[in-house]
Amino acid sequence: MNARYGMTIPLGGGPLHAQRACLEELAACGYTDLWSSEADGTDGFTPLVLASTWTPSMRLGCAIFPAYTRGPALMAMSVASLCQAAPGRCVIGIGSSSNVIVENWNGIPFEKPYQRNRDTVRFLKAALAGGKVTEEYETFSVRNFRLRVDVDEPPKILIAALREGMLNLAGRESDGTILNWLSPEDVSKVVPIVKQHGEDKEIVARIFVCPNEDRDAVRAMGRFAANAYLNVPVYAAFHQWLGREALLADTWAQWSAGDRKGAAASIPDSVVDDLIVHGSIEECREGIQRYVDNGVDTPVLSIMPLGMDPLEAARALAPG
């Protein structure tokens, strides 16, 4: 068993108030981490606050809190409150997110993502240390802010990263990185960039898992899921850098022409197979292990339900 083994929450489509038994079972099954996310579903903090009392042994993280969508002071207050709810058990994932979430959905200019992540992490470190912060950062300014919530044990802060610049930033400025939508082989390319700044840097990866042996059905669903990411500019650039330009050229062209269905249909089987772990339970376990073998310290499963209840899948994929 890997030292850490996480699950994405909420698990399944049920409301948050009904998740307690599910999260308690994840803890009993041997999962060590619960990780939320923040896009167009639940916010990142509320599931973790509930989990802080329902599963008092588990580490809690978010992949990710967008650096743009909360002001600096509010971000610091929210982080500090979570740290008080779960002292010593919090990991704060900071990332630029995407122009779709930041600009299209929240009406905030998606500008200077590298600098915004850097500035947010630097500010959080200063604010959580308890001193008064007055600083002209490149992407925002803070004047006379002092956090009135004590944080006895500062959380780990990780920067979500795709390409070299952000991966190096994660290694220099934070405790590690969070990876998303990449293959086990891709991990081998990105991890050394972060680890050159310290072998203690933690590598977290969200791994999409679909325990189903109907490969055609999985690939059909996988194309739909991947289409929403692979055509976002930051992810398109990421996969171009990873070497998938030829494989995804038709997809990108059809998306640019406004043909969303055509773009999805053009995603090759090999790309879906690279980015989504699927097959039998044993095949899925082997696929997850390949991420670990290539340098992931904390695999965080994201169950893609197709013919199997998410909790049933989580039980079957549990460590040990």
Image (tube, grey):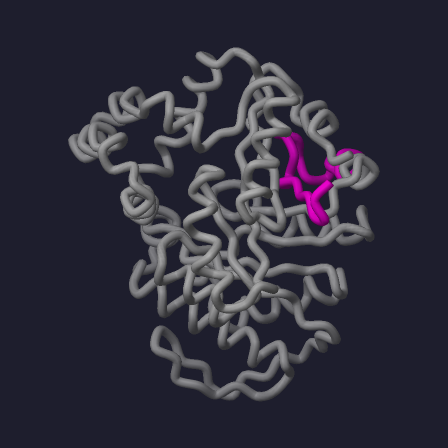
- Residue 69 in sight from this viewpoint: no
| Residue 273 sits in quarter | top left
Looking at the picture, how far across and down is residue 33, in whole percent? 70, 48
Q: Kindly identify the residue that appears in the image at 79 percent across and 41 percent down.
A: 27
Asked if 32 appears above or below 82 in the picture, the reply is: above
Q: Give x and y (percent) for residue 31.
A: 74, 41
Residue 170 location in percent, x, y?
A: 47, 64
Regarding residue 141, the answer to whether it shows in the image is yes
Residue at point 24%, 37% (across, down): 245
Query: Looking at the rendering, which quadrant does residue 310 occupy?
Result: top right
Residue drawn where x is 71% and y is 74% of the image:
151
Residue 156, magenta (yes or no): no
Left/right of residue 131 with respect to residue 264 in the rendered view:
right
Q: Nearer the viewer, residue 80 or 193?
A: 193
| Residue bounds of the magenta highlight | 1-23
Q: Is residue 165 left or right of residue 251?
A: right
Image quadrant containing the N terminus:
top right
Q: Is residue 19 magenta?
A: yes
* 253 relative to 19 in the view: left or right: left
At 21% from the left edge and 32% from the top edge, which residue is drawn? Answer: 249
Residue 208 image position (x, y, % from top left)? 53, 33
